[in-house]
Amino acid sequence: MKTNYIYLSYCLNEATPTYGNSDKVNLTKKSSIEHNDIANHTIITTSVHNGTHIDMPLHFFSDGQSINDFCCSDFIFNHVLFVEINSSDTIINQNLIQELSKAEDKMGIETIIVKTGIGSKRNDEVYWKENFGFHPDIADYIREFFPNVRLFGFDSISVSSFTNRELGRIAHRKFLDPKKPILLLEDMNLNEIYKEDNVKKLIVAPLRIENSDGLPCTVIAEVL
């Protein structure tokens, strides 16, 4: 059986959209072969919440977990639920819950990935200014009916809609509750993957920054 591996994460660059259009990525050449230096050497300045990244519980809880509290196997997911939705509402809620209710083997699912389609607008202002957010009730629903889910990923820039940041803060706290955290994988590249693709495995490779509240990461999917 043929399998393929595809990236579900974006490369960081200076055009990377950022939440609220702040804390932009900056790449500075400290040395350059073109300028007769011995080697190329680049300095990067960025928020740990830019590009495809994971929100750790420490992001919203002073006693929350960081990368130090997880092992390698926590970032390998062998049972993936991939959902595509069309939403006319900025805050996604019951329309997603309705799709999730159709899933089989809810007990076995380890991660839920949601494609809203907003990734096609990533180069436009609307991507960060009018992004989809996810209602806090979704975290409650997942914990009740998908008790083994450890990660919730999506193609929006944040679980928090920039148009309703107060609700977004509540959503962050609901998902990242240190008692049973559901890590948030934000700003995924889902442009080239579809519902009919069979995602066999998801591998998330966070940048290992000690005691960090967020982690830029590379995401790889094995599809059949």
Image (spheres, grey):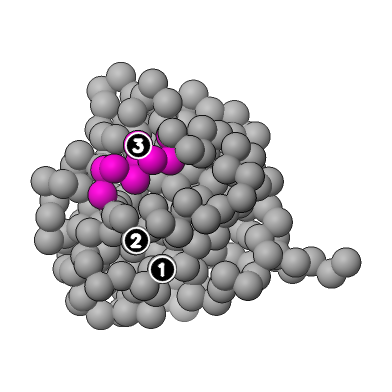
Under mark 2, the amino acid is Asn
Q: Which mark is residue 44?
A: none
Mark 3 Cα shell of 10 Å, populated few (<14), some (14-19), many (≥20) = some
SS of the residue at dot 1?
loop
**Residue 8, visible in the rendered structure:** yes
Q: Can you identify the residue that label 1 sits on?
A: 85
Under mark 1, the amino acid is Ile
Q: Give the percent coordinates (x, y) of residue 185.
A: 43, 50
Mark 2 Cα shell of 10 Å, populated few (<14), some (14-19), many (≥20) = some
Q: Can you identify the residue that label 3 sits on?
A: 140
Mark toward the start of the polypeptide (1 vs 3): 1
Query: In this view of the protein, which residue sits in the foreground, 224 or 126?
Result: 224
SS of the residue at dot 3?
helix
Query: In this view of the protein, which residue sits in the foreground, 179 or 52?
Result: 179
Q: Can you identify the residue that label 2 sits on?
A: 95
Point 56% across, 53% down: residue = 103
Under mark 3, the amino acid is Asp
**Residue 54, visible in the rendered structure:** no
User: Where, by quadrant of the figure, is residue 143 drawn?
Assistant: top left
Q: Give the magenta range.
A: 135-143
SS of the residue at dot 2?
helix
